[in-house]
Amino acid sequence: MIEEIKEYLDQISSLVLKIPSERIERLALIILDAYHAGKKIFIFGNGGGSSTSSHFACDLAKGTISPGKPRMKVISLAENVPLLTAWANDTDYTNTFGEQLKNLVEPEDVVIGLSGSGMSPNVINAFKVARDAGATSVLLSGFSGGKAVEAADEAIVVPSEDMQQIEDIHLMLCHIIFRAVRKRIRMV
């Protein structure tokens, strides 16, 4: 068992070093620009990506609070289970995030979707809604980025086909980005 553990940790370490720091910085800057412009940030995903999107939204919304400064407007679209299931049941699962966005998204908002495979139709659909609204869309993915990488304005793709490792790296990326954003908000 210890060899399996060491192998997993070695693989994660190797994957982390393959993520271009410039891509991480780019996402942090996109979030900071939205914050300074008073725009909203929407985050969502399926399965493990849903959990990570909620965690990231919590970190950004609460963890960036700084006395005397505006609060970040962050919403996880993975939270409203009745609305998610209503859209899935009454239309199609593809609409679960996009239809929520139609009620809320405005030009220059930021839409962040997590899709381990990059093939999630509801994430791709939400990126199309974001584009139509004039918002910036960002993908966190794995594998080769799938079809979602083509629909997103920006992307960070974890070069792996191991879903658990992709999800591990996504959470790490969210923490790195959160810490960078929080530091800059507190500095200004």
Image (spheres, rainbow, N blue to C red):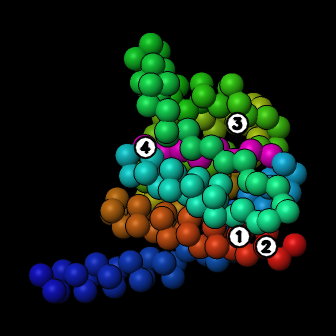
Q: Is residue 1 left or right of residue 125?
A: left
Instruction: Give the magenta-colored segment's residue range.
Output: 39-46
Helix, strand, or loop for circle 1?
helix
Q: Is residue 2 left or right of residue 117?
A: left
Decide which of tag 3 and tag 1 comes sooner along the chain: 3
Helix, strand, or loop for circle 4?
loop
Q: Look at discs 2 and 4 and give the one toward the viewer.
A: 2
> Crowdedness of circle 3 by 10 Å Cα count: few (<14), some, many (20+)?
many
Location of the N terminus by quadrant is: bottom left
Q: Could you tell me residue 182's position as x and y percent?
A: 71, 70
- Residue shown at the point (87%, 51%) measured from the top left: 37
Q: Spatial distance from mark 2 to mark 4, Cα to Cα?
A: 32 Å
- Residue shown at the point (57%, 44%) measured from the top left: 76
Q: Spatial distance from mark 2 to mark 3, Cα to Cα?
A: 29 Å
Decide which of tag 2 and tag 3 comes sooner along the chain: 3
Q: Amino acid at mark 2?
A: Arg
Q: Is residue 69 above or below residue 24?
A: above
Per the rendering, the mark at residue 130 is 3
